[in-house]
Amino acid sequence: MSERMPAVTDSDEVIREALEFIDPPLLAALAALTGDESILRDDLRPDLSNPLDPTGGWTPDKVAQAAGLALELIGRWRDGGCPPPGELSRSTLSRIMAFTVGGSLPEAYTELFVEELGGAGDDLRAPHWRKEDVAPERDFTVAVVGAGMSGLLAAHRLHQAGVPFVILEKNEDVGGTWYENTYPGCRVDVANHFYSYSCAQNPDWPEHFSSQSVLLDYFRQFARDGALNDHIRFSTEVVAAVWSEQDCAWDLELSGPDGPASLRVQAVVMALGQLNRPHLPEIPGLADFRGPSFHSARWDHGVDLNGKRVAVIGTGASAAQFVPVVATQADQLTIYQRTPNWLVPVPHYQEEIPEGKRWLFRHVPGYNQWYRLWLFYRTSDGLLPATEVDPAWGDERSVGLVNDLMRAFMSAYLEEQAGGDQELLAKTLPGYPPFSKRMLMDNGSWFSTLKRPNVELVTDPIEKVTRAGVVTADGQERPADVIVYGTGFLASHFLSPVRIVGRGGTEIHEHWAGEPRAYLGMTVPGYPNLFCMYGPNTNIVVNGSIIYFSECEVRYILGCIELLLSEGHDAMDVREDVHDAFNIEIDEGNLRRVWGAAHVNTWYKNAQGRVTQNWPFSLQEYWDRSRRPDPSEYRFYQASRELEPTKGA
Ligand code: NAP
């Protein structure tokens, strides 16, 4: 996956054709490549006032002008022998970044963006230390639980630091969610140039939003490239983890291919994922249904849907992907919708990246990274203002001015999609503010599915499931041969089903009592040397990539391990007051966001209505807070003895 850029030998004609797909980050990449900033003209600066507009406000005229400038620059660069990019000063980089995000770039972002860009293929997030240098004699092994996206990354970084580790994976292969979800139409709904490791960028993604098999291959390749497979114990589930106060170690109970086993390690990285325990709805009669039924994440490929009457319960991100496929197979498809979704228009969703654009990715050094940066800002922190709650705002359909502008934009899209069918629009237009729950990427396939003659969208509440079908509150029974549950996951059951017993013998789920919390989503007081990935309050509603969070978390965790090893401590446990103050901040932050304030069903909240899932601040802020552990926020232990508090504690 390393970037190998072939020299450009193509004619102007080939380049001109490729430039049909020009966008603002290409100009940024060319300015960075050639040092010619004149191309970054003020009139071509993207307008990100509507971050959901993938063109950045470029009119066809601006596209043509930008393409003309780019053609000239690429031609000159080609004729000059395609010299590699030179070193850019921080101020030059800053100016190019500011252009990319359509205005001035807050200073706090510059360093983060420098890291994201990587420059010349550098892996700026790799650990800058090795165990053999800081604690060569120390017996210290880390167990990584899960070989999905975050577990593989943790393992890769541990490998780079020379820290012994073992990965325990319940499945027979790597990939986590991308291994388990095989439903038809499954693909990532975050653009792949962003949904990928910064240290393993792929300059040649086949699609903007890759399908499940492409992603599974990507993660398999990452494991192979990093020589991680030899460290993985497949088909091995962690049943329990018990902290030994005496020895400062975690004793793991495993259920493996040869039966029960045990393992002692000095630290544990819990990389279990949030979205892997299927949620079946609490609807009476589920067990009575006589036909086949299955959950989207446990797709039964043995059931042929062709010619069948299929009922789909749920219309979330998974259903939005498999329903259009099922509709082409089923004789009759009935979709049971509880809450309509906001749709984000993404015309190229589900499309291959056109050859011209792939040419640009393959030939213009740095374009891949600048494009990633553009997605990063435009589709995550650039959207945050649209999620802010204005306490003085008096309309239930939105929470503030920017949120309302987004509501208007997406309402217009839904109206256009409904195409004058007022009954359909009434069923599909959400009454709650946008960004309260996950929004769905759409290229028109949802409505074209709903309009098919063999498809019915039912919005009456479901009363029960019977032997023969589904009954709604109006008493109508619609027969079904197969039921598919697209009803989501038990997302707020963090770290279940593992029994985790920490200091004082307290089990973590009992400690949480339905309110999972952690410091920075990673550490929990009373559970030393235990680090969560994708833990409480590290999820995002606006489209940031969860891989970004994993990268930040892994750096922090490696920082903790370095601290333990270099200072000769056996264990570290986050201080309760630090953890509590952080969680107050998180809760207050989430209440100021639309997803905390709006009254709508979401898996972001637990049964008590607390937002357990989401990070309420910017991606930049998470990066900043997780760059390195602050020793004053932890208690350190030497075997069972607590050490003097670190200065500043
Ligand atoms: P989900 O978003 O939780 O959607 C579950 C659906 O089932 C919702 O429509 C929900 O209705 C409905 N539902 C739940 N219980 C019900 C009940 N008792 N009666 C009727 N309807 C019920 O689950 P998901 O679609 O599997 O997606 C989960 C998350 O996975 C996503 O938000 C996303 O983060 C991730 N995901 C990502 C991708 C991707 O990147 N490719 C794809 C799929 C999923 P309500 O809306 O009323 O709750």
Image (cartoon, helix red, strand yellow):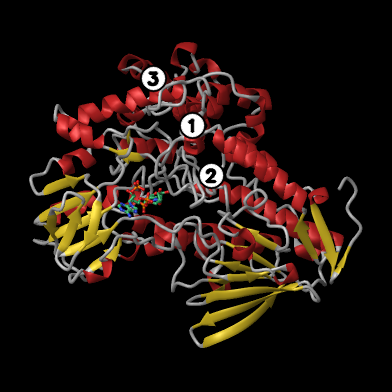
Between the C-alphas of marks 1 and 3, the distance is 14 Å
- Looking at the image, residue 509 sits to the left or right of residue 140; the answer is left
Q: Nearer the viewer, residue 579 or 136?
A: 579
Ranked by sequence position, the earlier of labels 2 and 1 is 1
Q: Secondary structure at mark 1?
A: helix
- For disc 3, the neighbor class at 10 Å (few under 14, some 14 to 19, many from 20) is some
Q: Secondary structure at mark 3?
A: loop
Residue 31 at x, y percent in the picture:
53, 24
- Looking at the image, residue 185 sits to the left or right of residue 194; the answer is left
Residue 261 at x, y percent in the picture:
59, 85
Which residue is situated farthest in the top direction here? Answer: 43
Residue 230 at x, y percent in the picture:
56, 74
Q: Measuring 75% from the left and 70% from the top, which residue is drawn there?
A: 504
Ranked by sequence position, the earlier of labels 3 and 2 is 3
**Compared to 169, does 460 lie above or below?**
above
- For disc 1, the neighbor class at 10 Å (few under 14, some 14 to 19, many from 20) is many
- Looking at the image, residue 38 sits to the left or right of residue 406; the answer is right
Q: Amino acid at mark 2?
A: Asn
Ranked by sequence position, the earlier of labels 1 and 3 is 3
Indicate yes or no: mark 3 CB to ligand 1 under 8 Å.
Answer: no
The disc placed on residue 271 is none
For label 1, the residue is 374
Q: Are marks 1 and 3 in contact (CB under 8 Å)?
A: no
In this rendering, the label closer to the viewer, 2 or 1 = 2
Q: Measuring 46% from the left and 59% from the top, which residue is drawn there?
A: 219
For label 2, the residue is 614
**Compared to 375, does 165 lie above or below?**
below
For label 3, the residue is 57
- For disc 2, the neighbor class at 10 Å (few under 14, some 14 to 19, many from 20) is many
Q: Amino acid at mark 1?
A: Trp
